[in-house]
Structures are given as structure tokens and as C-alpha cells.
């Protein structure tokens, strides 16, 4: 049987093929999508580490100042690091990435690296009400000064500090915390922040 071509008169209808159809000049433009109010995100929180000098001896303490600045449009509630933060026992957890300065290709991870922990007792200081704070737009707060020092060794190294506020973290250790305060922690702003890099040279003390 010979094949025959069948011509259909009238408009061509495309069913369920997902084609995008352009509008004619007389059609109204699409309505703009509704967006909610602008809110502060983790990218708007700037974690910064500063130190008075770049060279220390093995016998010197390394004074550090760590700050968070809110460059977002809305306030956020955060938690100050405290006893146990460096061990992962409470939120926020804090830690360091330390890389040799002569290895320019080595990159600090986006996630906090596993920390080198030392033995400690099972007790920790209880959470204090003043450790929770509201950081408003354009405000800067010092969250650590002079402690949570980096695990540096002799030589030249590049360092980055991490701050991870995890409201759902299960706290460890014997702290005698107020349950009402712990409940408030669950409403704080979850974020993982990575600081600027600093370079320190540690020399052998004479």
C-alpha cells in the first residue's frame, strides 16, 4: 500500500511536550515572582583572626583576637565559645587548620578539620546566659581573645580559625547546665564560619 501524506487544516496543537511558548506583542508581561524579606545568611557573617605580631618564640603565648561581624540585613543570635568548645563537647565548636607556609598549593578545608585533642577531665564550665548574644547588622563582637590558641610548632605556618554553631549538638561532659538556657541555644543561628588566614613564624627560644 502506498504511503499517503495527510495535511491537516487549522492550528497545530502540541500536547504535553513542554515547549516554551513565546508571548505576542499584545500579551501582558509575566508577573514578577514574590520574594520574602532579606535575611542574614552564614555568608554575611565574617570571622576574623588578628594577632599583634607575626613572630613568636616557643616560650611565648600567642595573643589572638577573634571577631565576628554581621554584614547581613537582620540580627542573628549566636553563642560565645566556652570550656569544651575546643573539644567538640558543646556548641559552638572551634578549631584550627594549620598548614606549612612553604606549601603554597595546600588549601585549608571548607569544613573544620579534626582537631588534635589532649586528655582532659570529664567536667566543664556550665553555660552562662551572657554567652548567648545578638549580633545586629554592622555590629562586630569579639568571641575569643587570648585563648583557643593554635597548635603551632617551630617553623613558619599558615593558620585559619573555624567557628561552628550547631544548635542541635548534643553536649558532653559534666557541666551542671541550666535546662532553660540549653533550650534557648536550640533557637540560635546555625552556621559554620571560616576565618581569614594568618601566617606565624615560631622560633626556638634561646
Image: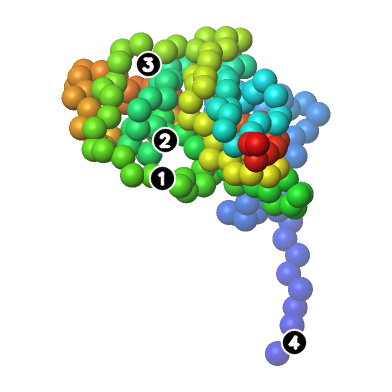
Q: Nearer the viewer, residue 140 or 14?
A: 140
Q: Nearer the viewer, residue 145 or 69?
A: 145
Mark sitting on residue 131:
3
Q: Earlier in the sequence, mark 3 or mark 4?
A: 4
Does residue 198 appear in this view?
A: no
Q: Residue at x 28, y 24 (%)?
A: 125
Q: Earlier in the sequence, mark 4 or mark 2?
A: 4
Where's residue 7, x and y in %? 75, 65
* Marks 2 and 3, how far apart at CA: 15 Å
> Are the residues flagged by discs 1 and 2 in contact, CB closer than 8 Å?
yes
Q: Residue at x 58, y 41 (%)?
A: 152
Where, quadrant-wise, is the N terminus in this rendering?
bottom right
Where's residue 64, x and y in %? 58, 23
* Marks 1 and 2, how far apart at CA: 8 Å
Where's residue 65, x and y in %? 58, 20
Residue found at the far bottom of this picture: 1
| Residue that mark 1 sits on | 117
Q: Earlier in the sequence, mark 1 or mark 3?
A: 1
Badge 3 crowding class, 10 Å Cα cut-off, few under 14, some 14 to 19, many 20 or more, is: some
Q: Residue at x 37, y 16 (%)?
A: 131
Amino acid at each position: 500500500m502506498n504511503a499517503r501524506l495527510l495535511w491537516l487544516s487549522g492550528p497545530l496543537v502540541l500536547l504535553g511536550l513542554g515547549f516554551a511558548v513565546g508571548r505576542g506583542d499584545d500579551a501582558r508581561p509575566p508577573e514578577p515572582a514574590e520574594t520574602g524579606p532579606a535575611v542574614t545568611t552564614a555568608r554575611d557573617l565574617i570571622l576574623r583572626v588578628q594577632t599583634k605580631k607575626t613572630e613568636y618564640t616557643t616560650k611565648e603565648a600567642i595573643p589572638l583576637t577573634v571577631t565576628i561581624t554581621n554584614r547581613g540585613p537582620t540580627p542573628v543570635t549566636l553563642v560565645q565559645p566556652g570550656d569544651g568548645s575546643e573539644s567538640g563537647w558543646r556548641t559552638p565548636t572551634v578549631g584550627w587548620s594549620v598548614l606549612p607556609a612553604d606549601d603554597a598549593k595546600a588549601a585549608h578545608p571548607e569544613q573544620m578539620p579534626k582537631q588534635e585533642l589532649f586528655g582532659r577531665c570529664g567536667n566543664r564550665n556550665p553555660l552562662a546566659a551572657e554567652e548567648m548574644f545578638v549580633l545586629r547588622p554592622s555590629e562586630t563582637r569579639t568571641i575569643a581573645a587570648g585563648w583557643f590558641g593554635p597548635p603551632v610548632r617551630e617553623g613558619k605556618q599558615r593558620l585559619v580559625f573555624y567557628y561552628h554553631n550547631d544548635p542541635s549538638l548534643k553536649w558532653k561532659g559534666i557541666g551542671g547546665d541550666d535546662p532553660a538556657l540549653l533550650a534557648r541555644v536550640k533557637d540560635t543561628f546555625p552556621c559554620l564560619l571560616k576565618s581569614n588566614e594568618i601566617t606565624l613564624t615560631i622560633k626556638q627560644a634561646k
